[in-house]
Amino acid sequence: MNDRLRSAAGRIGQSRIFLTVLALALVSAMGLFAERLVSAQQTRSQLPSPTDLSRTFINVAKEVKPAVVNIDVVEKAKRQALRLPEGFPEIPGFGDTTPRKQKGTGSGVIISPDGYILTNNHVAGDADQIKVTLSDGREFTARRVGTDPETDLAVVKIDATGLPFAKLGDSDKVEQGEWVIALGSPFGLQQTMTAGIVSATGRDLRQMIGNGAGTFTQFIQTDASINPGNSGGPLVNMEGEVIGINTLIFSETGTSRGIGFAIPSTLAHKVYAQLMKNGKVTRGYLGVMLGPVTPGIAKSVGYNGTDGAVVADVAREDSPAAKAGLQSGDVITEFEGKPVKSPKELTDMVADSPVGKLATLKYVRDGRPRTATVSLGERPPLNDREEQAGGEDDGKAENVGKLGIGVINLSPEFTRQARLRIASGVVVQNVQPDSPAEEAGLRRGDVIHRINRVPVTDRQGFLQALASIKGEKQITMQIERGGQLGFVTLNLE
């Protein structure tokens, strides 16, 4: 009997312990739930209300708008001379080349109290007359301090003191998703404000729209409405800091489609400092034309990897790169001890180096690592090169199988007229539609100098080079076009 009582008592004790533990667990869970509920309520209470958000926009506008200006420009453009066919009677005024006035409008932002204004080069760079209208309605005639076409930035100056000015922020800290405000004079409507977010950072637009996009610019993309006339105005964060200078849009209609771009303020600040000091921007210059290291190019030049920058061509015989012995096909892997991952990265590193600096770079040629010391020159102003096309046919062009091109031998006349850098190879005479050659961008008049690592001297050599790499799914050609060497890769699958 005593054993039974003891057994029952034990079971009751165990049940009490279980119930106690269960009760404690429930209390703990309820406490944790209550704590999280309070935390969630506190978090919700910390979120700004629509009214608070509106007030932030209002405050930023009040702070920055006084520093935003409207810029009206007048530029004298010469009329193109037109000639009447021989025998036609003279028409009064026909063929007149007298300059005519062209007017334009844009925006700018005051960045010092003594009247220095940051804007776009395409707004004020070629203007003969610049008129600046302040937010309070006052008008001033401005003078141009300096311009930098390669970043599309310019500085102009008005004679005034005690002006409201904006602060340039740190665009390196800008993140995708941030609220931003664009201010300016779209379509001449002064002091207009639009809002949106940072759609992306670090946009390199050169492949899409060429050097007009800015050689050294990694743009901030925004969906804040930017329209004609906004150019040169500020892109502002919610702290009232200028993080960009609005400069261009992508649009089929010429008006905003929610894809606008601004020059980062960190770059603008560097350019502004040089324009203030020298009236221009000086940059280091290597004297090469660069391309990305694709797998096909890497294979053709004997390089293992895709990091680096391939030298498509060396600019001139007296360029810093030429004097250092660099050649087309070299892959630059390191500059001043820093690894080179892309052509853009190398271009930026060279440009940021002082003129005259003795720079050490490492490169690979025919699979072998090498080192060179280069005395950097000064980067010359932008100039457009006209592409030369066409060729002299010394016989019937022979279409080459899967490639989709017809090639002919070089003639002495064509070699002389085209001023070829390399006086051997074959001329592309025709390119078949939808062929690997067309997809790779080959054109009539291109001169092919090498296939993968095999030099091409004439048409027979071209065919032999192709036969030696039969079965390849991809080949890379070194070509010359318009006096410049380069590489194209053909996919044969």
Image (tube, rainbow, N blue to C red):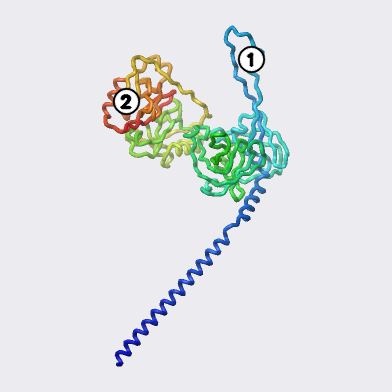
Q: Position of residue 83 (x, y in %)?
A: 59, 13
Closest to the observer: 273 or 409? 409
Name the residue beneath numbered marker 1.
94
Query: Quarter-wise, where is residue 143 in the image?
Result: top right
Q: Position of residue 333 (x, y in %)?
A: 39, 38
Q: Position of residue 50 (x, y in %)?
A: 61, 55
Q: Which numbered disc covers residue 28?
A: none
Query: Quarter-wise, where is residue 44 in the image?
Result: bottom right
Which residue type does callout 1 highlight?
A: Phe
- Above or below 16: residue 255: above
Name the residue beneath numbered marker 2.
455
At 31% from the left edge and 29% from the top edge, which residue is drawn?
Answer: 453
Q: Position of residue 389 (x, y in %)?
A: 43, 21
Left or right: 84 in relation to 32: right
Look at the numbered disc 1 and give the secondary structure of its residue. loop
> What is the quadrant of the C terminus in the image?
top left
At 50% from the left edge and 66% from the top edge, which residue is drawn?
Answer: 36
Residue 68 in view: yes
Q: State how many labels appear.
A: 2
Left or right: 195 in relation to 373: right
Instruction: Tell me which numbered mark, 1 or 2, is placed earlier along the sequence.
Output: 1
- Above or below 118: residue 239: below
Label 1 vs label 2: CA separation? Answer: 55 Å
Closest to the observer: 7 or 127? 7
The mark lying in front, picked from 1 and 2, is 1
Q: Residues within 10 Å of mark 1 (few under 14, many from 20)?
A: few
At 67% from the left edge and 30% from the top edge, which residue is drawn?
Answer: 129
Which residue type does callout 2 highlight?
A: Pro
Q: Residue furthest top?
A: 87
Look at the numbered disc 2 and give the secondary structure of its residue. strand
Residue 353 in view: no
Closest to the observer: 428 or 431? 431
